[in-house]
Image: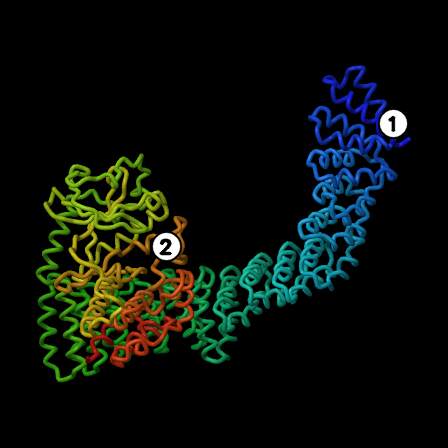
Amino acid sequence: MNLLGGFRADQLLSALSTEQDMDSPSAQRSIEKLKNLGPKAIPKTIDALAMCDRTHMMVFVDILASYVNDKTLKYFREGLADGGERVISGTAWALSSSNNYNPNALLDFLDDAEVSKPALIEILKVHKQSLNVYEVLRRAYELEPKEKAALFKIIEDIATDEIVPDLINRMGGKDPVIKMHLISLLGKFKGTQINQALEMQLGDGHKMVRSAALGALARRKGNVDIRKVAKLLLDPDLDVQGKAVEVLINMNHPDTVEYLLPALKDESEYTRRAAVEVLNELADPDSVKHLLDAIKDDDWWVRSRAGDALGEIGGPKVVQSVIRLINDKDEDIRRTAIEILNSTKDESAVAQLMVATDDSDWWVRERAVDALSQIGSKEAVPKLVAMLGKDNKMDTVLIRALGKLGDHNVIDNIVPLLARGERDVQVEAIKAIAHLADEKRAETVRNALEKIKLSSDKTIINSADAAIKEIDARFSPSIIEENVRAEKIVDQTKTLLIENEDIDSIIQAGGPQVLDISTLEPGTVIDGRYKYIEKIGKGAFGTVLLMQDQVVDERLILKFLNPNVSSDEEMMKRFVHELRYSRKITHRNVIRIYDFLHLQGCYAISMEYFPSHTLGGEIVDNKPMDFKRALQFSLDMATGMAVAHQAGVIHRDLKPANILINNESLLKIVDFGVAAAASSGDTQLTKTGYVIGSPKYMAPEQILGKKVDETADIYSIGVIMYEMLTGIPPYSRGDHMSVMYQHVQGKARLCQEVNKKIPDDFAAVVGKAMSVDKSKRYQSMNDLIDALNSLEL
């Protein structure tokens, strides 16, 4: 009989397949007969789905749906296991359309490896309100991750409060994926017992579970054990740490700050940074004082780490809280507050720091002066001048600060201190007047320094000699001639480096780029002024061309920014900001920047033309350089960078390719402002995809995305000195990421292990300059210059 029924079903389906109008009387008769034929028609109708069009599929699905009941489900299992997309889709459609069966029976289909799980889960979604949630939960444990997640989504939609105890009991299992789904489920219900269950998972051995528990707690209201959440700031996984920061900030619990102390004191820098991120959002003066009080009772190293964390990361709330603590009655609190402000270099602290220069504690007074110097506040100059000579213990730091903040007008206040008996005071006064001398006073200062060289004190003689060299480097006839040339070029230029104009108004929206520099031929004149001579080179940020400026009849360099750089508005703003400072650097060891130009749709930096080769060309076949030559180049680099730092410019990308040397061994540093402009200050990868800084020469803190200061350039010079003395960089094996990691680890072979002939004193200077911990490096280029000048080869 079954055989006959199947034959009859084939006939009806064949006839129906030839019908074009499903509403015709003949089509409707065939449909009615198929619906009355019995379950034996189901397999044949399912098979017919494979070759039918959409119109016929709708009819076949309707026929199948009429047969769906608890007894016929076995036939539909075959349709879901067919393997053909149309067959599976049509079968699922029929099962989804019918309510004439218990959908819980479909859960048994999950055991069949051939049944399409995605199709089955879609059917279960349609009938989810009729499903037994406990049975669905049991089945979810047995599935693959993707199907498991889909089933848990169904559970989440149908679960009610009565299932909560069962969910909590299941949290004791070992499967981390199941736990994550259970955590997500529990998160939708209310009750303190759920909070407790979630808090228990904060101690789970799997980071994904801890992270999921944090995420669920972040979305909850009510009483959460903030202490347990704060403990995860010490988590070994950085993602978990980051989620803990987010949760603590979102909860804004009044007791949060007191639980940050263990993280602030932890050895891991990442942990301390995480704690300060929370503090940035939740801190007030009372809470910061509480932390400083607690820290001061600990080991000095703990205090230092916690203070460094607060200072280096800073943040408006931390800074404002610390500013108010400068006036605290507790001397230790005041000292720590001043140290933090020394690290933050926040201009909002200037007024309070100036008040702190009158503090009863000499340490607070001295470090307040240092902080003002670090911030670069010229507003403090009159106050610092008035303090000179009032306290012998303070004069050294005052002179150093005035040398950085002042100008030629304070020279007369410093000169009398040259006669003081204390060597430290004399040395700082010598350096200061050399820094502050302008072109008009250069010769007078030079003569004064020549007289000081008559001293019998070798340190004083060396200091005066270095100061004279500095003045000569800035005001020699060749430099003055170059300054005149630069002024002549600038006077004739439509510069974009206008000091008193808003940067937004300077960067032009611009129009199309009409100049294609790749097609330039010798003799082509750009903008009616710049005659193309030849291409010098091309880098990540721009193409360097040698041009003849026909207006002033001088050769110069135009560095045209690449389109992917010049189209980045934020980067362009930073270029203008950095180049405004960079163009102020006038020194024989620094390439002079003239202007920032907009030429025929392109942006270009104009700068001094210096026929030369790179420092890399001096290190041939991995052979060490002559020590005297290496020392001279090291001094030249440090001297040029000292002037740059005095102007407020950090290079960030010192490397042999950016150090130029001519045939007379004159050294000049190039590419100021490029790396600085391309970096936001805390990251090394721009959205244009370029690493900011060369991995072989980058300081560890720059690699880690921290704030960069003058000591980063000192580190880079240390690496370059290492390469000059040994013939090879300290870290070069592997790809860029590997080299960066090696810098952070700081396990380079000592330069004397590579080249045993390196003098001990020279090797010591290199080692200190290359310290991974920037607080252990020379703290200024002048300190490095002093160390290099003291070497006797």
Q: Quadrant of residue 780?
A: bottom left
Tell me which amino acid carries mark 1.
Answer: Leu
Q: Residue at x 67, y 52 (%)?
A: 145
Q: Residue at x 84, y 22 (%)?
A: 32
Q: Indicate left or right for 781 with 434 as reference.
A: right
Sequence order check, earlier mark of 2 and 1 = 1
- In the depicted view, which residue is nearer to us: 117 or 413? 117
* Screen quadrant of the N terminus: top right
Residue at which label 2 appears? 679
Q: Indicate left or right for 338 with 487 as reference.
A: right
In this picture, is 477 found above or below 15? Answer: below
Q: Residue at x 30, y 40 (%)?
A: 508
Measured as percent of width and height from the top left, residue 382 is found at 25, 65
Measured as percent of width and height from the top left, residue 593 is found at 21, 53
Residue at which label 1 appears? 37
Distance between mark 2 and mark 1 Cα atoms: 76 Å
SS of the residue under disc 2: loop
- In the depicted view, which residue is nearer to us: 787 or 303? 787
- In the depicted view, which residue is nearer to us: 699 or 84? 84
